[in-house]
Amino acid sequence: MLPGTDGFEVCARLRRRGLWTPVLMLTARDAVADRVRGLDGGADDYLTKPFELDELYARLRALARRGPASRPTVLQAGDLRLDPATRQVWRGTVEITLTSKEYALLEALLRHPGTVLTRDMLIEHCWDLASRSHSNVIEVHIRALRDKIDRPFGTAAIQTVRGAGYRLRRDGGTPLQEAR
């Protein structure tokens, strides 16, 4: 019941801006739907009036003990983005659906853009130890990943480094004509 807006909107604006300062909503709105809306909207805690000061102080101490919130960073190379928190991937504004193995491969590559990741490094990140064979499992999944994140967009983000492994271009990929 703030002038011109409400606490739900203030909290949502903070979160949209990437500000993760702890938020405790202190309000007279005590319906379950309001508490759910507040917490789902980004509040860290929700306390309704009337309240005891001892409880308010305890909740503030609890928020302070949490320390800085570690939020998963959206991994990005050019217009290729991966959000570890939601497990979503986009090329520009287009959301791309990946299998769990394709997602794991892309995540490994995006966590180390410009770095060559060996076949063993990728297997270790994406498969269990029993998969350490000489099969072409990596090549098959890299091809499928390229079919989803590169070819439909006319780009070449994933590079094969002969005899070494694979590398994701830091710029997210050049147009296919330039990559050759």
Image (cartoon, helix red, strand yellow):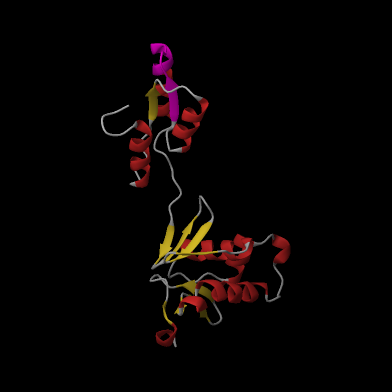
Q: Is residue 146 left or right of residue 1?
A: right
Q: Quadrant of residue 25?
A: top left
Tell me which segment is drawn in magenta. 45-57
- Residue located at (66% from left, 62% from top): 127
Q: How many marks?
A: 0
- Residue located at (40% from left, 70% from top): 170
- Residue located at (68% from left, 76% from top): 136
Q: Nearer the viewer, residue 127 or 100?
A: 100
Say which quadrant the C terminus sits in: bottom left
Q: Is residue 77 above or below residue 74?
A: below
Q: Nearer the viewer, residue 92 or 164?
A: 92
Q: Nearer the viewer, residue 114 or 171?
A: 171
Can residue 12 be seen at all in this image of the molecule? yes
Q: Is 50 inside the magenta-drawn segment?
A: yes
Q: Is 65 inside the magenta-drawn segment?
A: no
Q: Is residue 22 above or below residue 146?
A: above
- Residue 21 percent across, percent down from the top left: 35, 36
